[in-house]
Image: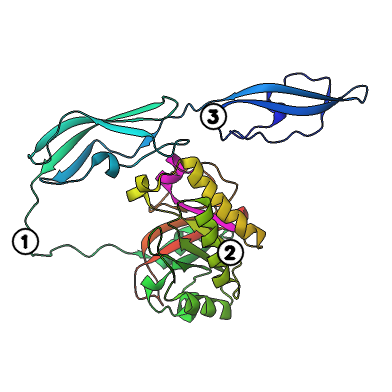
């Protein structure tokens, strides 16, 4: 909770000298000390007790069923995502009997408990199935595409700009042609790391892309795909990114992109620590004079990420979004097509009045 000293005082004969923010990140009772000046202009020390509790149950990312092949060695409590706002490692167990060596349907309950005794239970069916043999035929239909011109027609107005986010996966981009097609900004991948402890690598097209964008005066933002598992690691990432971008113009700022949800349990991070990492990263770039963005998809923004003071770059691939939070950018699709890019590309909407 974001609270101040005065939030718990109903009556006082004077004025508080320093109405500071209370640190509520540690569970337990704490003494809140402050001073106030009374009507006789006398400074008086005072204190009260505040009990900080965790009443939020863990989050279990699980639908009504889970399917594995016969003979699978997967550990369900390791594989199924389970996280908590406060605990790095909530206790997770599977209730019910099942046999992964035997085909069948097994009704089970996934139970997650945090250190404060908050519990989340989810009933689901475990389907143990025989793997389907490959037919060797590929009769799948071409995937549908979202055309940049259609996004412009629907979403472009005086308060919006339409752009792209680009990486080496889009190959060589013709910036003159994308500008002529109506692209007003780009968000470029700087690079990443090869896993949690891997070496840094520069995106194969970053220097080319940012150089061309700067040359034609197209506004640029950047992002870095993070595997950070601590505040120390995320600040090391930020320092590396800064060295890559400082020779260039990056007026739209730097986004924090952390999406390791399929193996989230391996990171041993509470939602608070995850969000604190993002804030540390974005605070670093703020200190260097850059704007900051937190990138996230709708569901994870709603259920995982805690509040941050930085703008949101929303990823939600839909004709309209039901996300209720405030967002400054909307990544509306990943199957975009635009003249000047010979591959699928993410299309983004920037809301200028929110910046």
Q: Residues within 10 Å of mark 1 (few under 14, many from 20)?
A: few
Sequence-wise first label, 2 or 1: 1
Residue 300 is inside the magenta segment: yes
Query: Is 56 located above or below residue 155 in the figure?
Result: above
SS class, disc 1: loop
Sequence-wise first label, 3 or 1: 3
Residues under numbered marks 3 and 1 in contact, where contact means CB atoms less than 8 Å apart: no
Q: Residue furthest right?
A: 40
In the displayed structure, does residue 137 sit left or right of residue 144?
left
SS class, disc 3: loop
- Quadrant where the N terminus is found in the figure: top right
Q: Which residue is at the front of the view, 106 or 179?
A: 106
User: At 59% from the left edge and 76% from the top edge, which residue is drawn?
Assistant: 217
Query: Is 164 located above or below residue 123 in the figure?
Result: below
In front of the other: label 3 or label 1? 3
Which residues, given as a range, are shown in magenta? 291-305
User: On the image, numbered disc 1 is attached to which residue?
Assistant: 135
Q: Quadrant of residue 107?
A: top left
User: At 52% from the left edge and 75% from the top edge, which residue is drawn?
Assistant: 210
- Quadrant where the C terminus is found in the figure: bottom right
User: On the image, numbered disc 3 is attached to which residue?
Assistant: 27
SS class, disc 2: loop
Percent across and percent down for residue 315 are 43, 53
Percent across and percent down for residue 29 are 59, 24
Residue 149 is inside the magenta segment: no
């Amino acid at each position: 909770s974001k609270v101040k000293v005065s939030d718990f005082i109903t009556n006082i004969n004077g004025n508080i000298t320093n109405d500071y923010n209370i640190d509520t990140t540690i569970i337990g009772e704490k003494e809140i000390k402050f001073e106030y000046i009374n009507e006789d202009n006398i400074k008086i020390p005072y204190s009260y007790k505040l009990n900080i509790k965790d009443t939020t149950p863990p989050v279990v990312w699980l639908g009504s069923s889970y399917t594995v092949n016969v003979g699978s060695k997967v550990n369900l409590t390791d594989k199924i995502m389970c996280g908590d706002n406060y605990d790095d490692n909530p206790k997770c167990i599977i209730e019910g009997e099942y046999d992964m060596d035997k085909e069948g349907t097994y009704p089970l309950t996934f139970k997650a408990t945090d250190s404060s005794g908050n519990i989340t239970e989810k009933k689901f069916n475990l389907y143990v199935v025989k793997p389907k043999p490959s037919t060797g035929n590929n009769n799948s239909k071409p995937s549908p595409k979202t055309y940049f011109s259609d996004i412009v027609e629907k979403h472009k107005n005086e308060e919006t700009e339409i752009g792209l986010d680009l990486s080496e996966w889009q190959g060589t981009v013709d910036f003159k042609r994308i500008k002529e097609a109506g692209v007003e900004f780009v968000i470029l991948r700087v690079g990443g790391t090869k896993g949690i402890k891997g070496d840094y690598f520069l995106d194969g097209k970053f220097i080319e892309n940012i150089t061309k964008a700067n040359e034609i005066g197209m506004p640029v933002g950047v992002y870095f795909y993070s595997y950070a598992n601590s505040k120390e690691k995320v600040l090391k990432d930020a320092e590396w990114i800064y060295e890559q971008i400082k020779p260039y113009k990056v007026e739209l700022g730097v986004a924090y992109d952390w999406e390791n949800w399929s193996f989230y349990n391996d990171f041993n991070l509470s939602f608070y620590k995850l969000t604190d990492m993002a804030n540390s990263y974005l605070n670093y770039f703020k200190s260097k004079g850059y704007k900051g963005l937190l990138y996230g998809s709708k569901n994870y923004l709603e259920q995982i990420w805690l509040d941050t003071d930085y703008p949101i770059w929303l990823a939600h691939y839909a004709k309209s979004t039901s996300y209720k939070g405030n967002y400054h950018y909307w990544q509306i699709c990943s199957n975009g097509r635009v003249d000047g890019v010979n591959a699928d590309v993410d299309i983004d909407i920037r809301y200028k009045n929110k910046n």
